[in-house]
Image: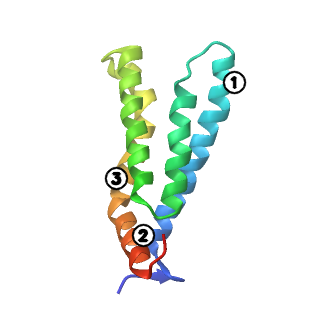
């Protein structure tokens, strides 16, 4: 029997914590990115921050859509990075290392989110 804390398992709680982290990162991207865009910089951070916030909220709701929104933003990050600096590993590392690590964690939460969705569906709540 899995360890439970209240009505949730440890993996579900860790998934929710990851959702909060993603929301905070997304809010930082949106707020700081808007400032950067107003100064004439890249709008990447605003564009990427919006799905991060939405993805984190959906993860808190226990929906797999949140994980896929994050993974979509990660794909966008890789495309933007390659467009901006090319295939230079030294230049790609600071742009993609952190988001990719979070992406691995998010990918690992997909089975947990599916289990949470299934449980919610069986209870009849949306």
Q: Residues within 10 Å of mark 2 (few under 14, many from 20)?
A: some
Picture quadrant of residue 72: top left
Q: Judge by depth and name the residue closer to the eye, 87 or 121.
A: 121
Q: Are marks 1 and 2 in contact (CB under 8 Å)?
A: no
Q: Residue at x 40, y 31 (%)?
A: 76
Q: Residues within 10 Å of mark 3 (few under 14, many from 20)?
A: some
Q: Residue at x 49, y 49 (%)?
A: 55
* Left or right of residue 37: residue 57: left
Badge 3 element: helix
Badge 1 element: helix
Q: Can you identify the residue that label 1 sits on? A: 35
Q: Residues within 10 Å of mark 1 (few under 14, many from 20)?
A: some
- Of mark 2 and mark 3, the one earlier in the sequence is 2
Badge 2 element: helix
- Of mark 1 and mark 2, the one earlier in the sequence is 2
11 over 50 or under it: above or below: below
**Mark 2 to mark 3 CA distance (whole Å):** 13 Å
Could you tell me residue 21's position as x and y percent?
56, 51
Q: Can you identify the residue that label 3 sits on? A: 107
Q: Can you identify the residue that label 2 sits on? A: 11
109 over 38 or under it: above or below: below
Q: Judge by depth and name the residue closer to the eye, 48 or 81.
A: 48
Picture quadrant of residue 117: bottom left
Q: Residue at x 43, y 37 (%)?
A: 73
Picture quadrant of residue 110: bottom left
């Amino acid at each position: 029997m899995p360890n439970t804390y209240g009505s949730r398992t440890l993996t579900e709680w860790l998934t929710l914590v990851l959702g909060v982290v993603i929301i905070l990162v997304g809010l930082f991207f949106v707020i700081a990115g808007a400032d950067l865009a107003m100064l004439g910089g890249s709008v990447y951070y605003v564009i990427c921050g919006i799905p991060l916030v939405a993805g984190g909220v959906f993860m808190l709701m226990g929906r797999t859509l949140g994980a896929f929104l994050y993974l979509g933003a990660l794909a966008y990050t890789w495309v933007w990075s390659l467009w901006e600096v090319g295939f230079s590993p030294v230049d790609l590392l600071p742009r993609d290392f952190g988001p990719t690590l979070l992406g691995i964690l998010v990918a690992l939460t997909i089975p947990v989110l599916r289990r949470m969705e299934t449980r919610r569906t069986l209870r009849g709540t949306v």
